[in-house]
């Protein structure tokens, strides 16, 4: 039984690349930065629309 489809793996890879290019993966030293990076990887299409996903606590 296959757990992940090729499409979901590609979605994740593209998300990591775009998130990295937007600077979300550069500083993961705190919980807000880490949560911002995780949200950005999952919601990467919003980054292409110019939406800022940096969390501020």
Image (cartoon, rainbow, N blue to C red):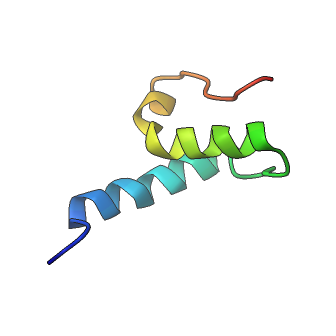
Give the side of residue 12 with respect to residue 40, left or right.
left
Q: Residue at x 43, y 61 (%)?
A: 13
Q: Residue furthest left?
A: 1
Give the side of residue 47 with respect to residue 27, left or right.
left
The quarter of the image holding the N terminus is bottom left
- Which quarter of the picture shows residue 4? bottom left
Image coordinates for residue 34, horizontal then vertical, percent: 71, 46
Image coordinates for residue 39, horizontal then vertical, percent: 55, 39
The quarter of the image holding the C terminus is top right
Q: Residue at x 46, y 31 (%)?
A: 48
Image coordinates for residue 31, horizontal then vertical, percent: 77, 43
Up-down: is 43 above or below 5? Answer: above
Q: Residue at x 69, y 29 (%)?
A: 54
Q: Residue furthest front?
A: 1
Image coordinates for residue 47, horizontal then vertical, percent: 51, 31
Give the side of residue 1 with respect to residue 29, left or right.
left
Up-down: is 21 above or below 40? Answer: below
Up-down: is 23 above or below 56? Answer: below
């Amino acid at each position: 039984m296959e757990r992940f489809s090729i499409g979901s793996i590609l979605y994740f890879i593209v998300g990591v690349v775009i998130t990295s290019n937007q600077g979300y993966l550069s500083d993961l030293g705190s919980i807000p930065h880490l949560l911002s990076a995780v949200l950005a990887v999952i919601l990467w299409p919003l980054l292409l629309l110019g939406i800022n996903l940096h969390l501020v606590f």
